[in-house]
C-alpha cells in the first residue's frame, strides 16, 4: 500500500514536527517528547485541559490545541498510548497553578498511563490533576482494548466545552463538572467500508470483502457489532443515528458530528448527513449545529461515525466560544 | 469499489441537501438547482462573490459559502461544469445591486458556461458581472480540459480575499482587482498515489501501478507531467514546492496550503508539511500561515498538493478577516 511517508517508523515524530511547523506561533513541541502544547503554556492561573492517545486519529488530538480548547496533546505511536512519562511531562508543562484536567478516551492503555502520569505529576509538584474518562461509543460494551465502552468522537465536544470554560477562568471543579456533563450527554457510533493500513505493517489491519461493511467499528479497526453486506448510505445513517439516539435520549436541541474515518470524501459524508438530519427532525429534535468532516479518524479507513450531544444553554454557550485550534471551527 | 452512497446518480443532489442541512441558518439551496447561497443573499448594496464547478472536489466550493467568503456556489455533476442556466440563476440570486464577481477555475466547460451565464444574467437585469479566471496549477501548460494552466487550490485564497473585501463594502472594481492580485501571486502543484473513483463508474478513472505515483496530476485524475516510481514524502514535497516557488518567485512572507486529495490521512499531510516548511525556510521565506487539510479534493484520490501565495499587507489583512464559511478557518 502506498503512503506519503519517509521511514514508516518516523511517521509520528515527523508528523508532530509538521503540526508545529504549520502553527508555529500558536503551538510548540516539548523537547524530547511527542507532546504539542500551546505556545504560551503554562497560562498562569488558568486551569489547563490536556488530552492524548495513540496517533493515527488526526486531527485528534493535536489539532485541537489552541486558546479555548486544549492546552496540550500527547501523541503516542500509531494506535499506541503515550507513555506515562510523556503524559506527566505534558501535565507539568501545562500546569499554571490552577489544576490540570486530563481528558482520557476509555482505552486500557490510555487510562493506565494517564493514572501513572497524574501520580508522577503530583509528586513533581502539580497540585491538582483531575481526569475525565470519555466512553461515548454506544456500539459495544467492553471491547478489544477496553473494559466498558470506547471513547471516540464525543471526546472532541469534551475538549471544546472544558477548554472554553477553562479559558474563562473557571476553577478546576467547574471545568471537570462540565467535562463530565458532556460525557453524560453524548453518544457516537461508527462503521467502516475498508480497513485502515498502519504505516509499519503496510497492509490492511483486518480483512473485509468487497461487498461487506463493519457496523460499530472501533477507531483502531477493532471489531464492531456486525459484519454485513454493503447497504445504502441512508440505511447506514439510520442504523447509526437510531442507536445513538436510543442511548443519548435527547429531548430538545442537539449538536451533531458526522465524522469521516480518514479515507472517505466529504461528498459522501454530506450524503450521510442529509439522512441523519431527516431522522433528527422525525424525532422532533432541533439541530443546533452540525460538524461534518474528519475529526477523529482511523488513518485511511473509509467509513463514518455519527455523534449526538444533548444540549443545554451552558453547553451551547461553551461550544459557541471562540478557539484558534486549527481543527475546530466554532459555529 | 464501496462508497457511502444511495443511487450513484443522486449523489450531487443529496450532497447539496446534506450541506444545507448541516448549515441551515447560514445557507440555503436555490429551488430546482444545485446552487448553495448564503441564507441572506442577496445582501443589498454589497458586491457578491460566487464560484462553481464540477462536484467531487468538496469542500470546494459550497464549503466556502458564508459571510466574508462566497455568496454562492454552483455544483455541477461530478467532474462536470454546472450549466449556464444554473450559473445565471446563482448570479441573479446573489445580485445585491453592486455587482457580482464570478471566480472561475480555468477549465473549458467552466469558462464557457460562466461566459454564457454572465450574458444571461445581464439580460435579466444584473448590472455588473465580472469574471476572474484562476490558473494556478504550475504543472502543465494546456491539459486535457484546458487551454492554458488549470485552476486548482489557489482558488480558495481568491475566494477568501475577494470575499473579505466585498464584505467590507468595496466596489466591484476593487474586489476584482484583489482577486486578480491573488491569481497573479499564487501557484500550486499536486500529485497522486491512487486514482479517484467516480460514483457512476465505480472503478478507478486511470490505472496506476502499486509502486507508481503521478506528479503534476489534475483534480479530475487527468495526466500530470510524470509517472514515476513511489518516492519518499520528503522527495515529493521537494519536487512540488520547488516547482511552485520557481513559478511564484515569492520574496517575503507567504501563505501555504498543503491540501489532501480526499483519501489521504491528515497525518501524512503533516509529514509533507514538515518538509515544505524546511524548504521555505531554506529559501529565506517567512511562513505567515499554513492551512493543512482537505480543501480541494478529487473524490477519494490519495495524494496531496502544495500551494504558495506571495503576500503583501493587503492580502494578509484579507486572509485574517473573519468568515463563517464552514470549510475555512481564519488564522
Image: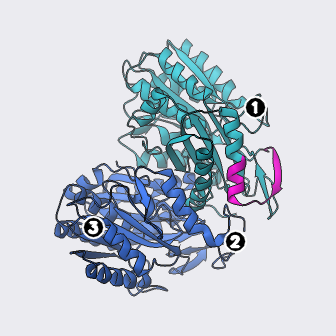
Chain colours: A blue, B cyan
* Mark 3 residue crowding within 10 angstroms, few (<14) / some (14–19) / many (20+): many
Q: Quadrant of the N terminus of chain A?
A: bottom right
* Mark 2 residue crowding within 10 angstroms, few (<14) / some (14–19) / many (20+): few
| C-alpha distance separating marks 3 and 1 | 56 Å
Residue drawn at 53 percent across, 19 percent down: B177
Chain under numbered label 1? B
Q: Are marks 3 and 1 on the same chain?
A: no
Q: Which residue is mark 3?
A: A95
Chain under numbered label 3? A
Residue drawn at 47 percent across, 85 percent down: A145
Q: Are marks 2 and 3 on the same chain?
A: yes
Tag of residue B178:
none
Residues tagged 3 and 1 counted as in contact (Cβ below 8 A)? no
Describe residue A316's horizontal placement relative to residue A152 as left or right: left
In this view, the mark in front (2 or 1): 1
- Report if residue A129 is visible in the image: yes
Give the quadrant of residue B256.
top right
Q: Secondary structure beneath disc 3?
A: loop
Pick the residue in front: A19 or A63: A19
| C-alpha distance separating marks 2 and 1 | 36 Å
| C-alpha distance separating marks 2 and 3 | 49 Å
Q: Which residue is mark 1?
A: B146
What residue span does the magenta drawing correspond to? Answer: B224-239
B227 is within the stretch colored magenta: yes
Q: Are marks 2 and 1 on the same chain?
A: no
* Mark 1 residue crowding within 10 angstroms, few (<14) / some (14–19) / many (20+): some
Point out residue A97 in the picture as x, y percentages from the top left corner. Answer: 21, 67
Describe residue A123's horizontal placement relative to residue A114 as left or right: left
Q: Which residue is mark 2?
A: A210
Amino acid at each position: 500500500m502506498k503512503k506519503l511517508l519517509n521511514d514508516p517508523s518516523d511517521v509520528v515524530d515527523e508528523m508532530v514536527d509538521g503540526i508545529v511547523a504549520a502553527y508555529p506561533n500558536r503551538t510548540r513541541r516539548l523537547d524530547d517528547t511527542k507532546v504539542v502544547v500551546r505556545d504560551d503554556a503554562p497560562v498562569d492561573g488558568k486551569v489547563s485541559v490536556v488530552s492524548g492517545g495513540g496517533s493515527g486519529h488526526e486531527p485528534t488530538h493535536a489539532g485541537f490545541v489552541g486558546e479555548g480548547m486544549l492546552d496540550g496533546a500527547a501523541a503516542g505511536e500509531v494506535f499506541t498510548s503515550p507513555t506515562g512519562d510523556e503524559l506527566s511531562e505534558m501535565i507539568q508543562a501545562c500546569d499554571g497553578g490552577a489544576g490540570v484536567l486530563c481528558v482520557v478516551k476509555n482505552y486500557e492503555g490510555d487510562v493506565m498511563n494517564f493514572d501513572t502520569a497524574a501520580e508522577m505529576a503530583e509528586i513533581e509538584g502539580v497540585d491538582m490533576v483531575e481526569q475525565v474518562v470519555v466512553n461515548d461509543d454506544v456500539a459495544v460494551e467492553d471491547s478489544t482494548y477496553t473494559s466498558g465502552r470506547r471513547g471516540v468522537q464525543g471526546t472532541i465536544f469534551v475538549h471544546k466545552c472544558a477548554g472554553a470554560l477553562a479559558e474563562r477562568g473557571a476553577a478546576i471543579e467547574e471545568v471537570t463538572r462540565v467535562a463530565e456533563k458532556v460525557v453524560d450527554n453524548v453518544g457516537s457510533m461508527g462503521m467502516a467500508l475498508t480497513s485502515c493500513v498502519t504505516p509499519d505493517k503496510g497492509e490492511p489491519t483486518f480483512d473485509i470483502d468487497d461487498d461487506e461493511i463493519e457496523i460499530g467499528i472501533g477507531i483502531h479497526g477493532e471489531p464492531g457489532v456486525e459484519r454485513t453486506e454493503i447497504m445504502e448510505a441512508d440505511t447506514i445513517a439510520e442504523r447509526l443515528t437510531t442507536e445513538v439516539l436510543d442511548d443519548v435520549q435527547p429531548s430538545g436541541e442537539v449538536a451533531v458530528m458526522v465524522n469521516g474515518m480518514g479515507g472517505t470524501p466529504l461528498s459522501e459524508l454530506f450524503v450521510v448527513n442529509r439522512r441523519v438530519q431527516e431522522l433528527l427532525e422525525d424525532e422532533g429534535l432541533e439541530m443546533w449545529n452540525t460538524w461534518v468532516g474528519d475529526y477523529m479518524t482511523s488513518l485511511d479507513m473509509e467509513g463514518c461515525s455519527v455523534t449526538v450531544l444533548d444540549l443545554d444553554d451552558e453547553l451551547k454557550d461553551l461550544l459557541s466560544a471562540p478557539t484558534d485550534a486549527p481543527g475546530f471551527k466554532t459555529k
